[in-house]
């Protein structure tokens, strides 16, 4: 294992493929930017994608906001009530998810114009493997600039791009300069780039993990680099193992186009925490109603139902249960989701998020069990 601690950026390291050219594209404040584009009067105003708190009794959640609003400390997942308190003059827009998805498809057409190796990880970001590309351009930097320019010319939306030799560093790079930024991290300067980053900037390190790292006097990538593999695995498990390699510039995951949707899910974050199980029942009932409608339109049957619970302290638990063959009505799905809630949900901890999803996986768990 010690071979990873020395000479890790060598081109001949058999564990580190530095020959690929990966671009990560992240649309800038995507939903809010669409609203500003469509309504120029919103330009230079703080725009928040959320229902106004007065319309939700203060229970709304910020989906995203533009960069003007972010100057007031507003961010996604913040309660709309707090956002309003921080910036009373902000413009609240309820949001149009179906429309945003349609615009997202237009954006992806520009990705596909340069490569078929496109892995969309959300409605507003994607990885592109441009090692070989449709425009026969050897420079990944030029490809990224072309994509940025074409999206602007066609849709009048900006995006930030990260260019590197693997997905992990490309993702970090796209976050480095926003909005409309382009950051390039080559194999030669990857080590320096990774060492200087604050620990909370590492993708996959959330608030709780960052707090634990700082308690261990780990504040930067360099501090993370100096931790042993054994320590990281003992304290952080799989996440620690993954970070051990990534801080050394190793991430050989391929860019994998997702051609078939294999799950349907709904989830919601609550500004006012849920402490009552009956409130949780009501929430999951609404979710399974929507899922059942979508299943009906797709003429498909799910095999596994998954329940996701996040508590006040951001602890997240995920549980699953096999469904009886043919189950797809809202009532059938609700009974399973309710069973999981009854078995595993501790409302005294304060429920911050609930989610329900169904998957068409072929491998079924034999019993209800936590996901690893």
Image: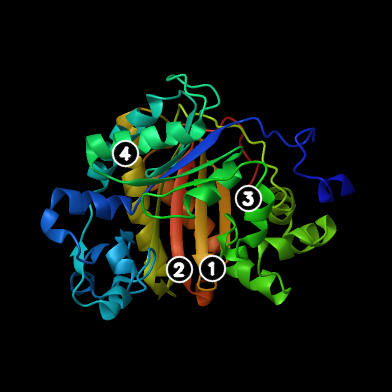
Judge depth for marks 4 and 3 and give the one in front: 4
Q: Earlier in the sequence, mark 1 or mark 2?
A: 1
Can see residue 259?
A: yes
- Proximity of marks 3 and 2: CB atoms separated by less than 8 Å: no
State the SS at label 2.
strand
- Position of residue 14 relative to residue 158, above or below, is above
**Are circles 4 and 2 on residues that touch, CB within 8 Å?**
no
Residue 277: x %, y % from top left: 44, 69
In which image quadrant can residue 103 be found? top left
Residue 12 picture quarter: top right
What secondary structure is found at the residue carrying circle 1?
loop
In front of the other: 51 or 344: 51
In-image side of 107 versus 22 (left or right): left
Circle 4 Cα neighbour tier, 10 Å, few/some/many (<14 / 14–19 / ≥20): some
In terms of secondary structure, where does tag 4 sit? helix
- The residue at which mark 4 appears reads as 104
Q: Is residue 219 above or below residue 19?
A: below
Which residue is at a point 59% across and 46% down the rendered structure image?
169
First in residue order: circle 1 vs circle 4: 4
Which dot, 3 or 1, sits closer to the camera? 1
- Residue at the disc numbered 3: 371
- Residue 197, horizontal then vertical, whole percent: 61, 61
CB of mark 1 within 8 Å of CB of mark 2?
Answer: yes
Residue 342 position in % (x across, y down): 52, 62
Lower sequence index among marks 4 and 3: 4
Local crowd at mark 1 within 10 Å, few (<14), some, or many (≥20)? some
Q: Which residue is mark 1?
A: 314
Instruction: Of the two numbered discs 4 and 2 on the same chain, state the one appearing first in sequence.
Output: 4
**From the viewer's perspective, is residue 160 above or below residue 136?**
below
The disc label shown at residue 352, or none: 2
């Amino acid at each position: 294992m010690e071979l990873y601690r020395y000479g890790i950026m060598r081109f001949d390291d058999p564990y580190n493929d530095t020959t690929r050219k990966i671009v990560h594209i992240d649309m800038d404040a995507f939903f809010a930017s669409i609203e500003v584009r469509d309504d120029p009067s919103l330009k230079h105003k703080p725009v928040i994608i959320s229902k106004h708190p007065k319309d939700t009794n203060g229970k709304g959640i910020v989906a995203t906001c533009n960069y003007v609003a972010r100057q007031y400390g507003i961010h996604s997942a913040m309660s709309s009530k707090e956002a309003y308190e921080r910036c009373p003059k902000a413009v609240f827009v309820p949001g149009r998810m179906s429309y945003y998805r349609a615009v997202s498809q237009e954006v992806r057409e520009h990705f596909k114009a340069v490569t078929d190796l496109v892995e969309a990880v959300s409605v507003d970001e994607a990885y592109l493997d441009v090692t070989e590309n449709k425009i026969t351009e050897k420079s990944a930097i030029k490809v990224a600039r072309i994509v940025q320019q074409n999206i602007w010319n066609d849709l009048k939306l900006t995006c930030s791009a990260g260019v590197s030799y693997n997905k992990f560093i490309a993702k970090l790079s796209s976050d480095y300069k926003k909005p409309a930024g382009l950051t390039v991290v080559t194999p030669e300067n990857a080590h320096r780039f990774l060492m200087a980053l604050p620990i909370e900037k590492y993708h996959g390190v959330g608030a709780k993990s960052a707090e634990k790292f700082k308690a261990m006097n780990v504040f930067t990538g360099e501090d993370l680099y100096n931790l042993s593999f054994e320590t990281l695995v003992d304290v952080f498990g799989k996440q620690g193992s993954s970070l051990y390699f990534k801080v050394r510039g190793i991430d050989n995951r391929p860019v994998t186009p997702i051609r078939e949707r294999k799950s349907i899910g709904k989830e919601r974050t609550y500004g006012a925490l849920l402490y009552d199980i009956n409130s949780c029942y009501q929430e999951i009932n609404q979710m399974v109603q929507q899922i059942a409608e979508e299943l009906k339109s797709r003429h498909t049957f799910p095999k596994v139902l998954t329940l996701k619970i996040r508590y006040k302290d951001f602890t997240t638990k995920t549980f699953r249960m096999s469904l009886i063959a043919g189950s797809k009505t809202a009532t059938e799905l609700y009974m399973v989701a309710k069973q999981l809630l009854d078995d595993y949900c501790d409302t005294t901890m304060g429920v911050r998020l609930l989610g329900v999803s169904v998957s068409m996986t072929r491998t079924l768990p034999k019993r209800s069990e936590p996901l690893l």
